[in-house]
Image (spheres, rainbow, N blue to C red):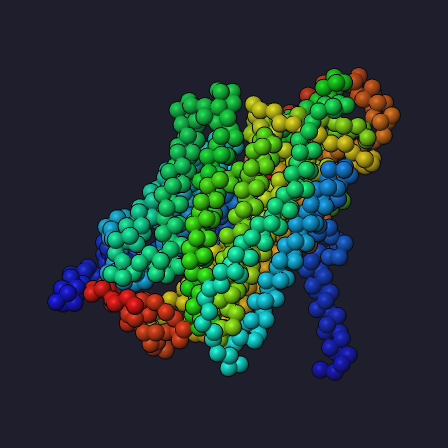
Amino acid sequence: MKRSDWVKFIGRSLSAVMIMFGSQSVLAVQPFNMTKGVTDISQRVFDLHMLILYICFGIGILVFSVMFYSILKHRKSKGHKPATFHESASLEFIWTVVPFVILIAITIPATKVLIEMEDTTKADMTIKVTGYQWMWHYEYIDHDVNFYSALKTSRDEIYNREEKNPNYLLEVDNELVLPTDRKVRFLFTANDVIHAWWVPELAIKKDAIPGFINESWTNITKPGVFRGQCAELCGRDHGFMPVVVRAVEPEEFDQWIAERKGKANKNFAALENAQHTLANSN
Amino acid sequence: MSTTAAEGHHADHPSGIMRWITTTNHKDIGTLYLWFAFIMFFVGGFMALIIRSELFQPGLQFVDPQFFNSMTTMHALIMVFGVVMPAFTGFANWMIPMMIGGTDMALPRLNNWSFWILPFAFTMMGSTLFMDGGGPAGGWTLYPPLTLQTGNALPFVVFAIHLMGMSSIMGAINVIATILNMRAPGMTLMKMPLFVWTWLITAYLLIAVMPVLAGGVTMLLTDKFFGTSFFNAAGGGDPVLFQHIFWFFGHPEVYILILPSFGVVSTIIPTFARKPLFGYSSMVYATASIAFLSFIVWAHHMFTVGMPLAGALFFMFATMLVAVPTGVKVFNWVCTMWRGAMTFETPMLFSIAFIILFTIGGFSGLMLALTPADFQYHDTYFVVAHFHYVLVPGSIFAIIAATYYWLPKWTGHMYNETLGKAHFWLSAIFVNITFFPMHFVGLAGMPRRIPDYALQFSDYNQIATIGAFGFGFAQLLFLWLVIQTIRGGAKTTDQVWEGAEGLEWTLSSPPPYHSFTTPPLIK
Ligand SMILES: [Cu+2]
């Protein structure tokens, strides 16, 4: 092969690989780490995640370098004669105690974050979240507003008869609208089986359990739309019950909730519709 | 003379299929366990490839979501109860009598029964896929109330789990009875090979937790069919109670799947480093500590159910403690290699990959132990990546390493080293292509157990699917190698490996039908 042939060959192989990996995206722009989120808690959870990750990297690099050095140097093929040692009290003491101390050190910030996450007192408002097969129900307890929130993605998109939109599977008919800079308390329960309400940007994942109530809270620092999913296997359409939170400025929220009050409870029909959307698909 | 008596006894054995059905010989039963595990490995692997095919692209292409869920459920049940556990029981049967200088297992008829239960249990469980309402689709964790929505399959699955539990408990009793009673004179506990030690501890774990699982699934059965409300809040029960029961079984269970692997790796590394195992007694104590800790960490699988702060903190601290004895083991293996005279035959390659990749799985386990961070990781692909790293390049690699290591002893033939190395490199590369990207999609927010996903997860899923097919097909090479070695090949010496130590290498290759008819001398 001439050089130009090689260039052509490599170019063609590369484009084949690109096509294989899907045309809609390039690897480099994909998210591959935990989100920092939009709350103080989510930022601190992210910091904790990075801390433990770096500690693991550190220990890993140390242990594996020793191992690879040994693999390269202490080979029979290089004429290395085996040593006969098989014990060292001091070494064994050190590598029991040092990891122990590192572990204690990590649990301190983790405990602090956990204590704060669990403190649901002094909330400005409360939302009751109920999991259904397969949608969410939100009740603004202080405002007498409630509605169901179900997947909006069409069956044609799911069954590949139509092009998928950018928010494929992460879009709902009624978004959960929340104010920024307010402490919002959540109460979680479920109507049928266990679900889990998860929004990565809020660092909240809590099980919604029939007959029991779980608590959590958030305080969103900036407006935006934050998407998550049910995280606990809940049956056939477990993959099709997203969570969408729209955070708006407090004034805008007050306006929205006033409008919403008027048409509260009118969308019970949505329940029936959504339950049939996927159950009868195919 | 004992030898003539043994041979006379041997001659009475039925041949053909009846030999295998009626056998009470530890080697025959070991072989049965290993072939059973091998077949189930391909069945469970085929299900994994169905899962990965559906996840190759966003959208629903091949299977219905309900069937997808029963594939994830069955894949897990088969791989845990049908592959890893029987494979290690197979090695225990073959090797424990040979390693401790005994003739056979202590309870040979029980041994026959504990194996022959398994094919029936798995046939029954597999048959549920063809029943009204399909197979179990609530996940291998069987959480109610979802699992109570299972159709006709539920009682069959529950009964199959009862049978698997009985089989494991009988196997465990046999292992304990053998180790405590059949050792050759002079083989004190602290002289036993580490594989025997890890199995002794594993057997106690099995006896402790299999009845707990049996109780839990029985309560599911009575809730579904006999009007009880153990897990039904409306009747005064608690769905979370099941999760506590399940994970009180489930966490020791994950050590049941990994402790024998530690034993295998602790046997293979010294052989090919030509140097004694570093820190033998600390290895024994570390194994015992891991076993003890496994009973007090179960709720780290369920931080998101909403437990009291004190509970969450206790389970976080206890879980982090597991890292200490596990670290001791890894450091000991590295120190065993240090200043040895290493060669890199296939069993050694798989063992080294085990240490590296299992450690990566251990690191992600440490991350998962941090409760606040676990809220982000829990039930995502990060968890899927974590436990596949400890189970595939962990337990499965140890099983493969053990097969290459002992197959020449069992058959008297050497396997094809070039093909063995090819099998290693294919497996090691594809296993990482499959499972490493799962860390990324998990952190990016992809929940586990979903048949379809948002567009930003596409690339990593495609890579994982390509890896899974590569890994799956690489195992056909393994099957070919094993068959080829059984059928023939270069004759091996009794010693087989230059650096191998232990009683099993003093027997001929292949070893006699009854291992040590006269007790060997222990140095
Ligand atoms: Cu759900």
Vertical arrangement, residue B457 with respect to residue B472, above or below: above
Q: Nearer the viewer, residue B523 or A88?
A: A88
The image quadrant of residue A171 is top right
Figure label count = 0
Farthest-out residue, front: A90
Left or right: residue B475 compared with residue B62: left
| Residue A242 visible (yes or no) | no
Horizontal and vertical percent position of residue B270: 44, 68
Would you say B191 lies left or right of A40 here? left
Residue B152 % position (x, y): 43, 34
Residue at the limit of the structure toward the right, as seen here: A251
The quadrant of the rendering that contains the C terminus of chain B is: bottom left
Name which quarter of the figure residue A280 lies in. top right
Q: Nearer the viewer, residue B289 or B254?
A: B289
Q: Please report the residue visible at 41 percent of the width from the left and 67 percent of the height from the top.
A: B405
Give the vertical position of B66 relative to B418 (above or below).
above
Q: Position of residue A232 (x, y in %)?
A: 59, 37
What is the x, y in percent for residue A135? 65, 30
Q: Nearer the viewer, residue A208 or A148?
A: A208
Q: Residue at x 25, y 67 (%)?
A: B521
Compare residues A87 and A250 and report the one nearer the observer. Answer: A87
Q: Is residue A264 above or below residue B388?
A: above
Residue A2: image quadrant is bottom right
Horizontal relation, residue A41 to residue A280: left or right: right
Q: Is residue B331 visible?
A: yes
Query: Which residue is located at x 70 percent, y 49 percent?
Result: A50
Q: Residue at x 49, y 66 (%)?
A: B336
**The N terminus of chain B sits in image quarter:** bottom left
